[in-house]
Every structure is written in C-alpha cells, then in structure tokens.
Amino acid sequence: MNKDLKIYNSLTGQKEIFKPLVPGYVGMYVCGPTVYSNVHLGNVRTFMSFDVIYRYLKFLGYKVRYVRNITDAGHLEDDSQEDKISKKARLEKLEPMEIVQEYTIDFHKVLDLINNQPPNIEPTATGHIIEQIETTKEILNKGYAYESNGSIYFDVVKYNNEIDKYGKLSGRNIEEMIANTRDLEGQDEKRNPQDFALWKKAKPQHIMRWPSPWGNGFPGWHMECTVMSTKYLGEQFDIHGGGMDLKFPHHECEIAQGKTANGIDPVKYWMHANMLTLNGKKMSKSTGNHLLPNEIFSGNNQLLSKAYSPAVVRFFMLQAHYRNMLDLSDEALQAAEKAYKRLMEAIKILPNLSVSGTTSFDVDALIDSFYTAMNDDFNTPVLIANLFEAARHINLIKDGKENITQVDKDKLQKAVNGFAFDVLGLHKAQQETGNNQAFDKTIRFLIDIRNQARTDKNWALSDKVRDELAKFGIQLKDGKNGTTYSFK
Ligand code: AMP
Ligand code: ZN
C-alpha cells in the first residue's frame, strides 16, 4: 500500500510527500469569508474542500489545529478603496457589526447544514487590530514599508530586490505587473503601483476606524491573515489554503509580509481550491452570478427543476477533485442525487449481509484503493468511484453471486463507513426508524392474512383487507414475486 500522503503545493507546482514541520502535528490556516453578504455555493465549495482535507488528516491520525478567520474589516473594494463591510453598513444605515453578525450566523448555519466541521480557532480581523499595528510597525522599522498621507504601504520593489521574488507563488514577475497596472485611486500615495496597504487612513465617511501611531485608520486586508495565522500556528506553519482567486495578490502579499516581519517563509504547503462555476462563469458575490445555498435547498430558483438536499449538494461537489473547476447544473445535480442514493443504499445493507466461509474478492486491495485515492492529493472523485466498487460487491453478495467472511465484512464495513462518513463527511441517509420497521411488518402481516384468505377462497376477508388498506391510502399490487404495497 502506498502510505505516503502527497499534496500538490502551489508554491512549487508539484505534488510533494507531506512532511509536517512537527511530526504528528499539522497547523492549517484557511482564509475565511468576508462577511458582508450571504455565502454562495462557490464559497461553500472551497470551505468543503478544506473540510475534507482537515477530516482526512485527522483520519490518518494527525493532531490538527485548523484556523479559519472571519474577515470582518479591511477587505477593500478594488476600485473604490472602501472596505466592503463599511460600505454595506453605510448604504444600509446599519452598524458594521450588525452586518458582520448577520452574515457570520448565515455562514455558520450553511456550513453546518452541509456537514462541515468547525475549525479549532475562528479569529476575527477586528479582534486582532493591535497585532496588525504591531506587525506593520515591525515592517516599517525594517525599512520595507513607508508612510504616505497617514497610510502605510509595503515596498514591493525593495522586497523583490533584497528579500525574495515577489510573485513566486502566482508565477508573475514584477516588471510585467508594473507595466500592466491600471491607475487606481490612491496610486499617487504609492512609490510603485504594486505596493499594497498595510494600514489605510480612514476617510471621513469610513465608519470602521481605529487609532494608530499614524492616525485613525483600518488595516489592509492581507495583514489580518499574516498576524492571525502566525499568532496561532507559529511564524512558519504547514498548510495555508484558500480559493484559487486568492493566490494573487492576497497570498503573495502574505508571503512578503511574513518573510519580511519574521525572516522566514510563512507556509510550507500552499493549497488552492478551484472555482465553482454557474453557466460556465465564476460564481461571485460581486458580479451577481451566484446561487445561494438556501435557493438550492428549497428549489427556489429558475435554474433548478427541484430542491436538492445538503447531502446531495455535498456529494455533487466531492465528485470533482478540489483542483478542478466544477460547473453546477440541474442535470448534474439530478445525477448526483441518484448516485448518492445508490451508494447510501449499499452502505445501509452492508451490516445485514449473510456471511460465508470464504470471500470471493480481494477486500484488502479494495480498502487500500480508498487510501491510495486520498493519498494522491485528496482525490475524492477516485475515492467515490472506489466506494461504488465496494457497493457493487455488496449488491452481488446480497444477490448470492459473491460471498464474504465475517472478518472481511467487519473490515469492509469499518473502512466504508470511515471513508464515506468520517473522511468525505457524507450525510448518513436516514436509517429506517423502529416505527417504520414496525409499520412495514404490520402491512406484511396483513398481506399474509389476505393471501391465506385467498388460498381458503375466503373472498370476503381478502377483499376486506385490500379495501380497508386502500382507505388508509395503501395500495396492494399482486405480481409474479408476490404482493407489494405502495402509498397512493
Ligand atoms: P470571500 O468571502 O469572497 O473572501 O471568499 C471566501 C472564499 O471563497 C475564498 O477562499 C474564495 O477564494 C472562495 N471563493 C470565492 N468565489 C468562489 C467560487 N466561485 N468557487 C469557489 N470558491 C470561491
Ligand atoms: Zn486570507
């Protein structure tokens, strides 16, 4: 069995054997949401990708500290240079913290529905203003930032010349970047267009503001992730994740800030999840091309023919590898729903299979294939295909065409449950409750009485059973394989 876990590192562009900095322990940081509107399904996909990574690391026995922040200040609109939350609060005449509260609650609710596990620490940008000011001071003292009109900017060119290549994560080079930059507001304050804000002076209409050595202002977006990741995971830690769109400039800036402040590359493995598209276009809050979780769970959207449960949505997303794009469509969801039900049905009957003295297939190889899939950079679609291979054997055993020993059945059951529920986090399909089983047995008992009556040519009794059941909405159907029932 291939026991090495391989992770695709965006920094090197290669799959690397995973070796945490401290054996047995993993520090993982994922950029969280900017809580100025409802999370859309694209956001959900990224957080689910890292949920599965978190779950699998724990499944392998690592002790994981998973930190995912809440961006509740500092995320600038590209053009306006205004904080997204501050802007929304101003437009809706609300306190910024009312906006933050509303959408943080929504975010937690949705991730809970979709069966994501919460991180171990969920720090907020506004809870770490002091740390952000301190790190800004440090970079300023080292000479890699400068003050301009009450704002502090990071000197990208100086960093690039003296410390490390700016653009090494996103594969860009600084000369090209400078050549391609548009003129944005605030550019005149900067030495170079690529310089980014560590701290911004607050304009009079900017509601979210804090005192600093440079006057009233607010932190730059990239700074919060540098201070919160290093505060809770150390100056260098194992895994940093986020959506592909955060690679540049956000993560590039985090590397520059961390390396300048602490003299060390902050992250060993950079991981990026690919985008969810809708009608072939990126799902995005700012362009309006998005589908909200509530719309898909209720079916309340023109693009959908029906509602889909959180379980089906989760299964649908995990059928794609996290580094591949995924396009959402009604047909794809319908197919996912069928497949999910088929898999759950097989998992449900597994404990009730009869056992024999031999097993007619290689259970160990099948279980190994689950590990091999996930060890190959968390390949969930291959894992799901291998779980379906298990389902195929389960159905053959049920039909008496294959067999399995008690020991192998126990092993398979443990592995299938572990990978389907603990690793993929699939929702367990509702097991039949005791009441349902009692109901089913009662109807079957009445069917037996009716059959006996028919054998005895007691037509009055047999008709009575059928007609009474019909009154309760239960329809009997006589077929080649006996009598079945359905609900009218
Ligand atoms: P935001 O709230 O915009 O900062 O985004 C939160 C997370 O969702 C980030 O990691 C983004 O990269 C990610 N994200 C945004 N749009 C999409 C999308 N369409 N598909 C997948 N992930 C996305
Ligand atoms: Zn971040």
Image (tube, grey):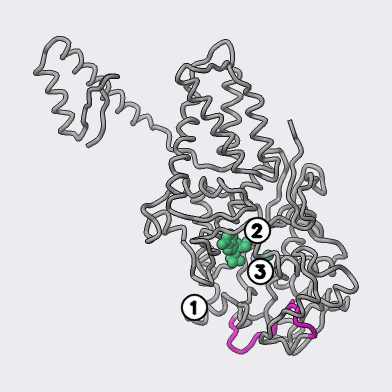
Element assignment for label 1: loop
Image point (59%, 28%), residue name:
414
Residue 340 drawn at (x, y percent): 47, 40
Dominant secondary-structure state across the stretch colored magenta: loop
The image shows residue 54 at horizontal and vertical percentages of: 66, 47
Q: Position of residue 150 (x, y in %)?
A: 74, 87
What secondary structure is marked by label 3? loop
Instruction: Tell me if residue 391 comes above or below residue 421 in the rendering.
Output: above
The quarter of the rendered structure image containing the C terminus is top left
Precedes in sequence: disc 2 or disc 3: 2
Helix, strand or loop at mark 2: strand
Q: Earlier in the sequence, mark 1 or mark 3?
A: 1
Q: CA distance from mark 1 to mark 2?
A: 26 Å
Residue at the right extreme? 162
Q: Is mark 1 within 8 Å of ligand 1?
A: no
Q: Residues within 10 Å of mark 3 (few under 14, many from 20)?
A: many
- Tell whether label 3 touches label 2 (CB within 8 Å): no
Residue 331 drawn in magenta: no
In this orientation, does residue 33 appear?
no
Question: Mark 2 is on which residue type?
Answer: Arg
User: Residue 268 in the image: x percent, y percent?
Assistant: 80, 54
Within the magenta stretch, is there residue 197?
yes
Identified by mark 3, the residue type is Ala
Specify the quadrant that holds the N terminus: top right
Q: Residue at x 21, y 27 (%)?
A: 476
Residue matched to label 1: 94
Q: Is residue 37 above or below residue 119?
A: below
Q: Which residue is mark 2?
A: 68
Magenta region, residue range: 191-207
Which residue sits at x=38%, y=32%?
433
